[in-house]
Amino acid sequence: MATTSAVRAQGLFRAYDDFVAVNGIDFDIQVGECFGFLGPNGAGKTTTMRMIYRTSPVGGGTLEIFGRDASGQGADRDLKAMMGVVPQLDNLDQEMTVTENLTVFARFYGMSKKDRQTRVEEMIEFADLVDKRDSLVETLSGGMKRRLMIARGLLGDPKLVILDEPTTGLDPRARQRIWEKLSELRKRNATLILTTHYMEEAERLCDRIAIMDAGEIVALGSPRDLIQAHVSKHVVDIRLGFDGDAKALKPLYGDAKRVEELQDRVLLYVDDAESLIARVAHEFPELDALVRQATLDDVFLKITGRGLDG
Ligand SMILES: Nc1ncnc2c1ncn2[C@@H]1O[C@H](COP(=O)(O)OP(=O)(O)OP(=O)(O)O)[C@@H](O)[C@H]1O
Ligand SMILES: [Mg+2]
């Protein structure tokens, strides 16, 4: 089936004075896809997101949203109305109540008064803020504000949802609720773009991920492909004990795609853990070894911790 682009960037660039924050990146996000930007602090994720939701000018290259040119600064109300945005930083109106904050946005989407009330009510319930509906935002806890920001971003039933670290600071129950809501949106073919520092979240939600570092996309693919390409299926984690010496394990290194020597253990990245575990049990019966699935955490550490050749 033919796919269509929701957001397409070519050579997308942004500098602040002479500091380059986004250095000519290419990506093509498909309609209905959940696309994640990962990367260390300062990698350029928020700058990229802000260009997509048009609060930061595009410094160079091209940017198209649903086939329309979005690299200029012209106010494109239609485009804005299709987007739901959850920025990284709290930009709620602190001196308004929870309900008022949502109502102001509902007006922007041009809903009738009746629809507006129903929708605001629905989103207050979704954000679990029924008890706080008449409280001023400044009196909410950090996590409550975050939930309100997400509710506000999803209020207009957007076709394109842009979430910059949506679940940072949320408790596990609230996070679960957000994940469920985002899955629901996916079922209705909304396109999701998100950043997160939680690898588990990215792995769970994203079809594809771009890992950014110093303004560049340094890896791009599905979570599974990234794991396969950069680490391996499994990690054999061998505990050395207090006086253990990694050197003794060197004969095993040839069996691994990659080796990471840590202070008290050695990580061996392998596709077939069984034979290696058997070898460890046979040759080093005194050592503890456990096997776990490789995760995006391993990919992230490898790529952003020591460069692609690491
Ligand atoms: N308004 C600004 N003026 C000057 N420099 C900026 C500005 N906004 C961002 N930067 C710089 O651009 C770089 C990228 O910042 P950005 O906010 O995009 O990073 P990020 O990947 O979102 O990081 P984080 O994970 O910490 O949110 C950083 O070095 C930052 O200091
Ligand atoms: Mg950011």
Image (spheres, rainbow, N blue to C red):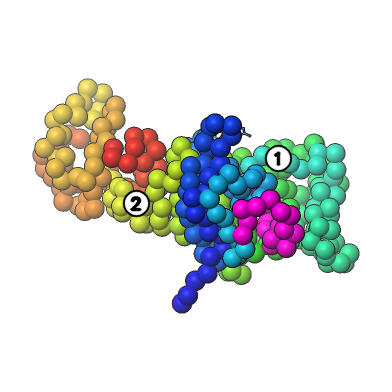
Viewer-side residue, 235 vs 283? 235
- Name the residue: 77% across, 54% down: 124
Q: Is residue 173 visible?
A: no
Viewer-side residue, 294 vs 45? 45
Give the quarter the ligand 2 occupies: top right
Picture quadrant where residue 180 is located: bottom right
Q: Which circle's residue, 1 or 2, is located before the other in the chain?
A: 1
The local secondary structure at tag 1 comes to loop
The local secondary structure at tag 2 comes to helix
Please, what is the three-letter code of the amino acid marked with disc 1?
A: Asp
Q: Quadrant of the C terminus?
A: top left
- Name the residue: 85% across, 39% down: 95
Between the residue at mark 1 and the residue at mark 2, the CA separation in whole angstroms equals: 33 Å
Picture quadrant where residue 112 is located: bottom right
Q: Is mark 1 within 8 Å of ligand 2?
A: no
- Indicate the position of residue 145 as horizontal and vertical percent values: 72, 42
Q: Is residue 286 left or right of residue 218?
A: left
Question: Residue 235 got which mark?
Answer: none
Q: Per the image, is 107 magenta?
A: no
Query: Which segment is the magenta one?
Result: 69-86
Q: Which residue is mark 1?
A: 90
- Name the residue: 68% across, 50% down: 73
- Indicate the position of residue 84 as horizontal and vertical percent values: 68, 56
Q: Is residue 246 visible?
A: yes
Picture quadrant where residue 213 is located: top left
Q: Which residue is mark 2?
A: 227
Mark 1 surroundings within 10 Å by alpha-carbon count, few (fewer than 14), some (14 through 19), many (20 or more): few
- Indicate the position of residue 108 as horizontal and vertical percent values: 81, 57
Q: Per the image, is 77 magenta?
A: yes
- Name the residue: 72% across, 37% down: 141
